[in-house]
Amino acid sequence: MEKWQEHNKNAYKTAAQLRAHSGMDHAALEQVTETYPLRLTPHLLELLHTKGDSIARQFVPTAAELEDGGEVDPLNEEGLSPVPHVVHRYPGRVLLLCATSCFAYCRFCTRKRHVGRATHGISFSDLLGAVEYIRATPQINEVILSGGDPLTMSDRLVQELLGRLRKISHVKVLRLGSRAPVVLPQRITPALCKLLQQAQPLYFMTHINHPDELSPACIAACRKLVDAGVPLVNQTVLLRGVNDSAALLQGLFERLLELRIRPYYLHQMDLTRGTAHFRTRLEDGVEIMAQLRGALSGLAMPHFIVDLPGGHGKISLVPEYVECLGEQARLRAADGTLVEYPNRLSS
Ligand SMILES: *Cc1c(COP(=O)(O)O)cnc(C)c1O
Ligand code: SF4
């Protein structure tokens, strides 16, 4: 067994194990974990001790999860799935949901209904059907490996899957989303880095929400990936009571840039059942973006994204910079000043 697999095996998975770390009474905690799975790696338990709330709110279950009647599948992923494990919403790119479990369960997860609930994982023969769909659909030029966490697969399986995708000539770019650098940094082994390097161009999408997640081990894991030639981009979920502050996010995005991780998306929380207590208002995210503009290096500036209900896709929300267009446009500067902009083509 590899070292990361040993660490992973020692994760907490039951309410009884977590009892000492949760303020909830045991019966209530058990009730939540009957509905939504619980998992915390030893690395996260250590962070929970040293950092506290920023980690607890993201990973320790609370009764609020049972109080909210939102949608089970707000993005209509099931309706957009032509074959099992594939979500095909945009013509040129697909999600390949190649794992049903994660190393740790984020309480705000969009796929709360799925991840960690399957009685068995996805078999390789299941995945072959998905690969076959991608092969038979020439307009697909990008495949996004997601799940669950794709790195719960063994190196052998990851390599086999990436190899098969790389053999499809119309697939130009691969993307792999994983929370492993944060929750199980041991997973980022030299062998894994090498096989990801061999699958280039492949973008590794980290998921980091708070500076407290950037432990020395996490930073070292990210550095290994970048040094191996794997480009890193990050998605952050805007979470009430965790990171909904412009100052905190500015610090996070600056730090990520310094670590050679390009901030890509800041996500508005989806309307997923059991997550309402994490959701901010749209105005909050727009206001945060207005404060970041100008303050933050453009390289560190993510897009603020709302994934629209019903499967209509992602849009980016921006503060009001356009007062009016036309021959003499009026635009609003980051500091609020209205600036005239001559907007005529030369003859
Ligand atoms: C988010 C998502 C993508 C990727 O969208 P980008 O804007 O390219 O990051 C692709 N397909 C589905 C179904 C998605 O939800
Ligand atoms: S790692 Fe991603 S898929 Fe897994 S629980 Fe967290 S948000 Fe959901």
Image (cartoon, rainbow, N blue to C red):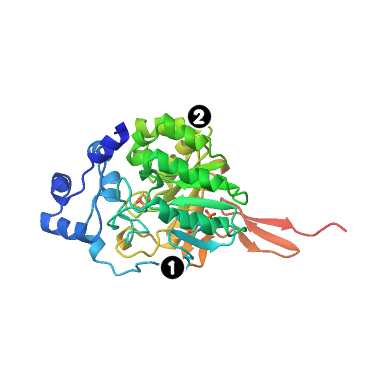
Q: Residue at 52% across / 59% down in the picture?
A: 133
The quarter of the image holding the N terminus is top left
Tell me which corner region of the image, top left, top right, bottom left or bottom right, holds residue 328: bottom right
| Left or right placement of residue 68 versus residue 301 in this view | left
Residue 116 in the image: above or below residue 82: above
Q: Residue at 50% across / 44% down in the picture?
A: 162
Residue tagged by mark 1? 76
The quarter of the image holding the C terminus is bottom right
Residue 139 in the image: above or below residue 150: below
Which amino acid, mark 2?
A: Asp
| Left or right placement of residue 18 versus residue 68 in this view | left
As drawn, the label of residue 227 is 2
Q: Can residue 242 be seen by looking at this rendering?
A: yes
Q: Position of residue 182 (x, y in %)?
A: 36, 40
Q: Residue at 51% across / 48% down in the picture?
A: 302
Return the disc, 2 or 1, that comes first in the chain's sequence.
1
Q: Position of residue 124 (x, y in %)?
A: 41, 50
In-front residue for pair 312/124:
124
Q: Are marks 2 and 1 in contact (CB under 8 Å)?
A: no
Q: Residue at 27% across / 49% down in the picture?
A: 59
Tell me which corner region of the image, top left, top right, bottom left or bottom right, holds residue 152: top left
Q: Secondary structure at mark 2?
A: helix
Residue 200 in the image: above or below residue 265: above
| Left or right placement of residue 313 versus residue 22 in this view | right
Q: Secondary structure at mark 1?
A: loop
Task: Work out how far the residue at label 2 is from the one at label 1, CA to CA, in angstroms.
Answer: 38 Å
Q: Position of residue 284 (x, y in %)?
A: 43, 58
Which amino acid, mark 1?
A: Asn
